[in-house]
Image: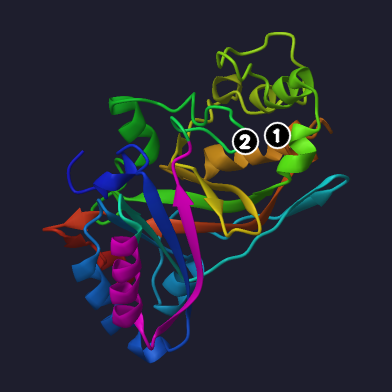
Amino acid sequence: MDNVQSGILESTPSVARYLIFSLTDQDEARQSLRLLSNIADGRQTIVGFGQSLVRTLGATVPGLRTAPSYAGAGYEVPSTPFALWCWLRGDDRGELLHRTRRIDEALAPAFRLEQVIDAFIYGTGRDLTGYEDGTENPKGEGAAEVAFVQGHGEGLDGSSFVAVQQWVHDLDHFEAKSAQEQDYTVGRRRSDNDEIEDAPPSAHIKRTAQESFDPAAFVLRRSMPWTDDCHAGLVFVAFGASFDAFEALLRRMVGADDGIVDALFSFTRPISGAYFWCPRMQEGRLDLRLLGV
């Protein structure tokens, strides 16, 4: 597709950074966003805007909303909305650092950098548990159809919605499980990535089989492991033409309809959750017409 933030369709990079900003000066916001639109190329730097920022600008993006929260026995899924999100992709951590500095400078003083998460590729694209990640991702034209808005008009077509969660793993607890218990938690064998047909209904693969929903709940995952030397886990990133598919998956993970909670919660938990709208590109810059910028 033309005029999309093309990095969304590319495979995950060897290293990445996630930048999360809050809005601190409404009067300077538009000027800062103009500067950012000149820096973000949509390939190595992908940008998303939260509902709070869009509302502050007096704008509306159809389909953009705040992430839901859930809590129950054995799980908690928080909602932690922010104004602005950047996904920096690359292969050199030093270059990502300097790019972070340029973006932070462009956005100040209207925006304050609240969090930086450094991420990386593990092995051939595995979660830190050793299991392959994103096995069911759509490919080729199917990926674009899932990830980007189409048929809704100029300014919206070619944009994408992204759900972002930071998960913290208890790897010691996971590794204390037997090999079979680990496989049954995920629903696949780590040795060959084959799905286990007789895995329990709480297995992650059983909970989130995208084609088992009506309508099918396909998302384009671009998740990456992270660590801050004290903790580690997965930054779950799911792009879609809307948030509907992601929310269907999440509701089933927490057992909202049948009471069966995803076995992933036995060793990992999300500590954040936010929704953002990623605008299309126009002539090499972010197309911010819907924001009035």
Q: What element carries label 2?
A: helix
Query: Residue 149 has which mark?
Result: none
Q: How many marks?
A: 2
Query: Residue 249 has which mark?
Result: 2
Left or right placement of residue 21 versus residue 6 in this view: right
Q: Residue at x 51, y 32 (%)?
A: 126
View extreme (left): residue: 283
Question: 10 Å neighbourhood of mark 2: few (<14), some, or many (≥20)?
Answer: many
- Kindly identify the amino acid type of the residue bearing the numbered disc 2: Leu
Quarter location, residue 175: top right
Left or right placement of residue 114 versus residue 186 in this view: left
- Kindly identify the amino acid type of the residue bearing the numbered disc 1: Arg
Q: Quadrant of the C terminus?
A: bottom left
Which residue is denoted by mark 1 in the rendering?
Answer: 252
Residues under numbered marks 2 and 1 in contact, where contact means CB atoms less than 8 Å apart: yes
Q: Can residue 203 be seen in this view?
A: yes
Q: What stretch is highlighted in magenta?
A: 94-122
Examine the rendered structure and indicate whether residue 23 appears above or below residue 49: below
Q: In x, y percent, where is residue 281?
A: 21, 55
Q: In x, y percent, where is residue 97?
A: 35, 67
Question: 10 Å neighbourhood of mark 1: few (<14), some, or many (≥20)?
Answer: many
Q: Which residue is drawn at 62% across and 51% down?
A: 232
Q: In x, y percent, where is residue 145?
A: 34, 32
Quarter location, residue 105: bottom left
Q: Residue at x 45, y 79 (%)?
A: 56
Left or right placement of residue 184 versus residue 13 in this view: right
Q: In terms of depth relative to the viewer, which is nearer, 112 or 159?
A: 112
Q: Does the magenta-highlighted stretch encompass residue 5?
A: no
Q: In x, y percent, where is residue 230?
A: 65, 59
Q: In terms of depth relative to the viewer, which is nearer, 257 or 41?
A: 41
Q: In terms of depth relative to the viewer, which is nearer, 54 or 21?
A: 21
